[in-house]
């Protein structure tokens, strides 16, 4: 069922409309798609700084609910105008499964941070690309060459090196606790995200799928945190927090969700998720831009290891 007659050609984005009113397919080179994922990685990296600035003003679960809901409300009118709000029980159910992975991840992250540190969680998150490959291997038949499998391991080592700033003693001293186990469960859910996008995408425009992922994600979050909505002192939330939520909703939710889901059919789940290896290095650049200074020189080798792993992972020969 479609609520409107304005539809895209199944499985392709539109580059405008021809004289007969039908959308013209938009084809991109793989290089362009890789550049889109670099943009997505840059945007996601800014979310750590923005989120840290506003997280004290709103409960994290409520913040995520507002973020998802606002993103759906902002994106919905454009999707309706461009494609029509296509709907079917199948589309709704598939998007609910995809968004469920995201919601489980965020909920585990919020809960885990009651018992563990952001440093521990950032290290554990380095497992996600490898988990995505394991899921993709069984669900979508994605295969990687020996060099690319080795690159997954090297990328994970490089990320850990950057996070701990090349200090092995800090890594060995890291205490594992209940929160780490909870977050590890969330990472297992997050690793399933991109393989499910590839498995469950049935030809709809990725813009339409992104919208319904936002809607179903909002519904999941209402079930999880809706009871706390009445306890929030909304009038006391400062303006800068609302600006931060708006930034997260538009740039690190609508845009990054769309770019990630758009890239999966081109690059595959593992290669898309491997861009998360860039986050620590990009965060260091953001800190530098904000005047926090250069990282220690011993961090640099880890950054080069990550970049080398990224290059090998994106090699289509594997």
Image (cartoon, rainbow, N blue to C red):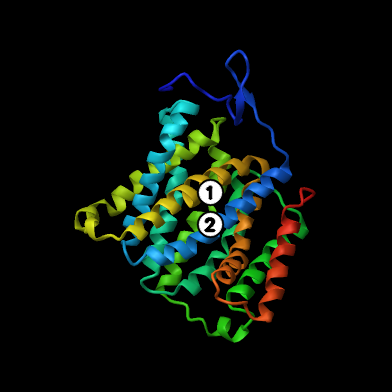
**Is label 1 in contact with label 2 (beta carbons under 8 Å)?**
yes
Secondary structure of the residue carrying numbered label 1: helix
Q: Mark 1 or mark 2: which comes first in sequence?
A: 2
The number of discs equals 2
Compared to residue 192, the image places residue 122 above or below, namely below
Give the numbered dot on residue 44: 2
Q: Position of residue 231 (x, y in %)?
A: 20, 58
- Can residue 299 be seen at all in this image of the molecule? yes
Side of 221 relative to 8 (left or right): left
Residue hosting label 1: 256
Q: Hey, which residue is sitting farthest right in the picture?
A: 317
Q: Position of residue 178 (x, y in %)?
A: 40, 73
Q: Position of residue 220 (x, y in %)?
A: 35, 47
Give the numbered dot on residue 169: none
Compared to residue 248, the image places residue 79 above or below, namely above
Residue under the image location 54 percent in, 61 percent down: 45
Side of 152 relative to 200 (left or right): right
Secondary structure of the residue carrying numbered label 2: helix
Camera-side residue: 313 or 79?
79
Which of the image's four quarters has the N terminus?
top left
Compared to residue 282, the image places residue 96 above or below, namely above
For the residues marked 1 and 2, what is the alpha-carbon distance in whole angstroms?
7 Å
Side of 11 relative to 174 (left or right): right
Residue under the image location 70 percent in, 59 percent down: 310
Residue under the image location 38 percent in, 51 percent down: 67
């Amino acid at each position: 069922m479609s609520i409107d007659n304005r539809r895209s050609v199944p499985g392709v984005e539109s580059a405008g409309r021809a004289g007969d009113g039908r959308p013209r397919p938009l084809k991109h080179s793989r290089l362009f798609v890789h550049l889109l994922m670099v943009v997505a990685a840059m945007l996601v990296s800014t979310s750590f700084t923005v989120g840290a600035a506003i997280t004290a003003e709103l409960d994290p679960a409520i913040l995520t609910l507002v973020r998802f809901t606002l993103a759906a409300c902002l994106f919905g009118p454009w999707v309706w105008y461009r494609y029509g709000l296509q709907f079917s029980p199948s589309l709704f159910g598939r998007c609910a499964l995809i968004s469920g992975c995201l919601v489980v991840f965020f909920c585990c992250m919020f809960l885990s941070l009651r018992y563990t540190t952001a440093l521990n969680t950032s290290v554990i998150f380095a497992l996600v690309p490898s988990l995505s490959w394991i899921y993709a291997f069984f669900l979508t038949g994605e295969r990687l060459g020996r060099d690319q499998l080795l690159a997954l391991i090297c990328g994970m080592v490089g990320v850990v090196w950057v996070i701990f700033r090349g200090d092995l003693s800090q890594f060995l001293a890291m205490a594992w606790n209940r929160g780490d186990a909870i977050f590890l469960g969330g990472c297992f859910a997050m690793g399933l995200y991109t393989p499910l996008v590839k498995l469950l995408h049935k030809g709809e425009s990725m813009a339409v799928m992104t919208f319904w992922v936002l809607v179903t994600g909002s519904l999941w979050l209402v079930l999880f945190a809706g009871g706390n909505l009445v306890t929030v002192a909304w009038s006391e939330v400062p303006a800068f927090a609302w600006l931060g939520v708006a930034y997260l909703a538009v740039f690190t939710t609508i845009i990054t969700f769309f770019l990630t889901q758009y890239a999966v059919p081109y690059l595959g789940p593992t290669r898309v998720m491997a861009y998360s290896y860039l986050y620590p290095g990009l965060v260091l650049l953001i800190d530098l831009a904000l005047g926090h200074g250069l990282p220690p020189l011993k961090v640099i080798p880890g950054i080069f290891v990550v970049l080398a792993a990224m290059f090998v992972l994106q090699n289509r020969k594997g």
